[in-house]
Amino acid sequence: MFNLERWQEIFETLSKNKLRTFLTGLSVASGIFILVILLGFSSGIENGVTSEFQQDATNEISVRTRRTTKGYKGLNPGRYIQLKDADFYNVNSNYDEFLEYRSASYSIWGGQVAYKNETGNYRVQGVMPDNQFIENADIGTGRYLNNSDLEEGKKVAVIGNKVKSDLFKGENPIGESISIFGINFKVVGVYFDPGGEREESGIFLPITTVQNAFNGGDDIRDMSFTVKMSENFDEAVALSQNLSLAIENDLKQKHIVAPDDTAAIRVNNTLEEAKKIYSLIDTIKAVFWFIGIGTIIAGVVGVGNIMIIIVKERTKEIGIRKALGAEPLSIIGMILQEAVFVTMLSGLIGLIAGLGLLELVGPQVDSAFIKHPQVNFNTAITTVFILVAAGALAGFLPAYRAAKIKPIVALRDE
Amino acid sequence: MIQIKDLHKSYHMGSNSLHVLKGINFDVKEGELVSIMGSSGSGKSTLLNILGMLDEADTGQYILDNVPIKNLNEKIAARYRNEFLGFIFQSFNLINYKSAADNVALPLYYKGIPRKERTEKAEHYLEKVGLKEWSHHLPSELSGGQKQRVAIARALASEPKVLLADEPTGALDTKTSYEVMELIQGINDEGKTILVVTHEEDIAHMTKRIVNLKDGIIIDDSRVEQVRADQHV
């Protein structure tokens, strides 16, 4: 392997048989190249689909209430179930260890919002600071709500990007006052949401402020939580389901709602939905791997095929070499070393070309369903080695057979 | 140099067996130039292949330079070929992607001689066969006679005990054949032992001894007056 003379002989052979070398290399390089691109786009699709469903946190549990539809324990149907601050704090303290973010909200319907002469109708919600993470919102300028806003009931507002562009027409809204039902709030931040314009046409205020200003008392409209994610996704889904059930039962008991009254208190967990999406992503991944492995197999077969042809083409040369004193082992060694060298080099070229293309084009690809295609370098280099090893194995058999041919037979070969 | 006693060789093809060599006895001394003649099917090529260790006899004794040649495995056969023998073929058998010099240097590569020395020796032997200026040419750029001379240089390069030539002039016209024979005679004059298989009378008479084979046995083995090839050229 480290015999310099052997290497010189091999380089000479390769450089004097450029077409053969080139074709062998091309088949390997293109195989690896295609594989890298495939894996890249599979990860791109994964990223794209994931981000499509990330307008809200995927591990959200939300609680909403309506009127009861069934009589229970002597109470008539049609009774409105009103959630209170206490309900939120109960859930919070009972299931603290399982929860990541938590926020109660109090919405105002048909929120008339005005800035100077501009007016508009937006979703106005009193929320808690954690709401940012439950909504998956990003802060563009300024800040989100914080705990001191909440505790002191400050009259501050975080507005969506759409609200900003509607009302402020390019002016900087931070520090300006907007009026909601005639009450002035100071804008402290502008948020973006992966969900786009619809999600960005809302205004968030501290819930305490809203309860005070709009006679809410300790009423809340709904509450949202996110479940702590564990390493194992299935465990997280199970936890999320159990938690939803437990919260639902607690609330139904406290508010005296029939256990089978599904309308009165509704607890949704999005993780179950997310599970479907993730299994879709897994399927896509599996399909790409299947194609990838198919490509590798095709590559290996191709390399093996080329090896057989090369050995066949060189039968006479092998006979000559043997007549001149080449030992069988040196024939096998020569053919294998040459094969491994060519497949390895061209495999790496294909790998670099593939990675290069992804690196170049990847950042510019940002369609709805493909985002940041990229490849795990280790995966790629492993496939190169698999291809090389398999190619060598495929080349060994014809090389071995060639070394076994009697020189007299090989010399007769035309 | 070569001692052969009662050599037998059969080929089996299915249920048929073909007895090709039926007891060959002959000796070759150092410095001889021997031609082996016979019609096709007489067994002359088989005899040469056995002498060249490209094939093995069924029974009989073959001693080359005091080394008994028997029970060879591929590895030892390869080493003996490299050490003892130089081959000259009818169809030249040059490696077509290697230059003349590289072809000549190839047996030296298998001898384990370093590159620099190989190149020097190859140049030396190419000069000897009169192809010094052609050393960087590929076989496809050479005429038939030039190719055969490269092959002779290659056979000489490993400094073998015996040169084996299988119809060395079979693919050449008369004039070129005589040129090649002139070269072979010159090498023999320097003391090299050479065996030539041929079916051409004129070529055979340019050697010093003619062995006639028919149906697997030697029917005639006689010394002849050598015709010098340069008289014809």
Image (spheres, helix red, strand yellow):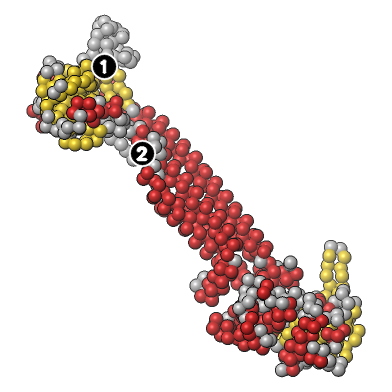
Front disc: 1 or 2: 1
Q: At numbered mark 2, what does the secondary structure look like: helix, strand or loop?
A: loop
Q: Residue at x 58, y 86 (%)?
A: B120
Q: Residue at x 88, y 90 (%)?
A: B222
Q: Identify the amino acid type marked 2.
A: Asn
Give the quarter of the image for residue A321: bottom right
Mark 1 or 2, nearer chain start: 1
Counting from the top left corner in percent of width and height, residue A368 is at: 39, 35
- Judged left or right of residue B100, residue A189 is left
Q: Given contact means CB atoms under 8 Å apart, are the residues at marks 1 and 2 in contact?
A: no
Counting from the top left corner in percent of width and height, residue B34 is at: 81, 88
Counting from the top left corner in percent of width and height, residue A199 is at: 28, 27
Alpha carbon distance from label 1 to label 2? 31 Å
> Do pointers 1 and 2 mark residues of a single chain?
yes
What is the crowding at mark 2: few (fewer than 14 residues within 10 Å), some, or many (at least 20)?
Answer: few
Circle 2 residue:
A232
What is the crowding at mark 1: few (fewer than 14 residues within 10 Å), some, or many (at least 20)?
Answer: some
Residue B211, placed above or below residue A235: below
- Judged left or right of residue B185, residue A173 is left
Judging from the image, mark 2 belongs to the subunit labelled A
Residue B65, placed above or below residue A373: below
Of A302 and A33, the residue lying toward us = A33
Circle 1 residue:
A65
